[in-house]
Amino acid sequence: MYWKLRIPLFIFVIGAVSGIFQRYARLLFLNRSSFIASVVFISVIVILFTVLERTKINEKNVHFTVGIGLIIIGFLIDYLMV
């Protein structure tokens, strides 16, 4: 069974960016205002997802277990970086 990478990569990107932003908030100057932090967080996710769409990486078909692995890795990065 094969799956397009669109949804697993989206969940992986959200988890990875969330973990990085939580871990390095002071380094990224995100401890100033929650509104600014939210705007930067959403902007980075949109930029990364746009890059993945333009390079056609999201259109590749992968096995179902690879997709589930990417989702789990995204959750683990978010969980372990707190």
Image: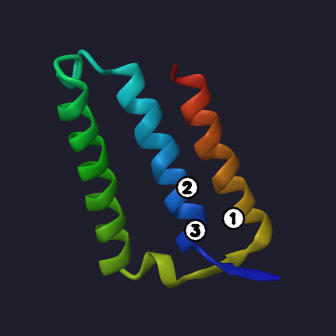
Kindly indicate whether the residue at mark 1 contacts the one at mark 3 (C-beta within 8 angstroms): yes
- Residue 41 vs 47, above or below: the answer is above
Kindly identify the amino acid type of the residue bearing the numbered disc 2: Ile
Q: Residue at x 21, y 25 (%)?
A: 28
Q: Secondary structure at mark 1?
A: helix
Q: Quadrant of residue 7?
A: bottom right
Residue 78 location, x and y as percent?
Answer: 55, 33
Residue 49 location, x and y as percent?
Answer: 36, 65
Q: Which residue is mark 1?
A: 67
Kindly indicate whether the residue at mark 2 contacts the one at mark 3 (C-beta within 8 angstroms): yes
Q: Quadrant of the N terminus?
A: bottom right
Gap between marks 3 and 1 measured at Cα? 8 Å
Whether residue 7 sits left or right of residue 54 in the image: it is right
Kindly identify the amino acid type of the residue bearing the numbered disc 1: Gly
Gap between marks 3 and 2 measured at Cα? 6 Å
Crowding around mark 1 (Cα neighbors within 10 Å: few <14, some 14 to 19, many 20+) is many
Q: Earlier in the sequence, mark 3 or mark 1?
A: 3
- Residue 64 vs 20, above or below: the answer is below
Whether residue 22 sits left or right of residue 1 in the image: it is left
Disc nearest the viewer among 3 and 1? 3
Q: Which residue is mark 3?
A: 7
Q: Which mark is residue 11?
A: 2
Crowding around mark 3 (Cα neighbors within 10 Å: few <14, some 14 to 19, many 20+) is some
Whether residue 14 sits left or right of residue 25 in the image: it is right
Q: Earlier in the sequence, mark 1 or mark 2?
A: 2
Q: Residue at x 19, y 22 (%)?
A: 33
Crowding around mark 2 (Cα neighbors within 10 Å: few <14, some 14 to 19, many 20+) is some
Residue 21 location, x and y as percent?
Answer: 36, 30
Q: Residue at x 47, y 31 (%)?
A: 19
Residue 24 location, x and y as percent?
Answer: 33, 21
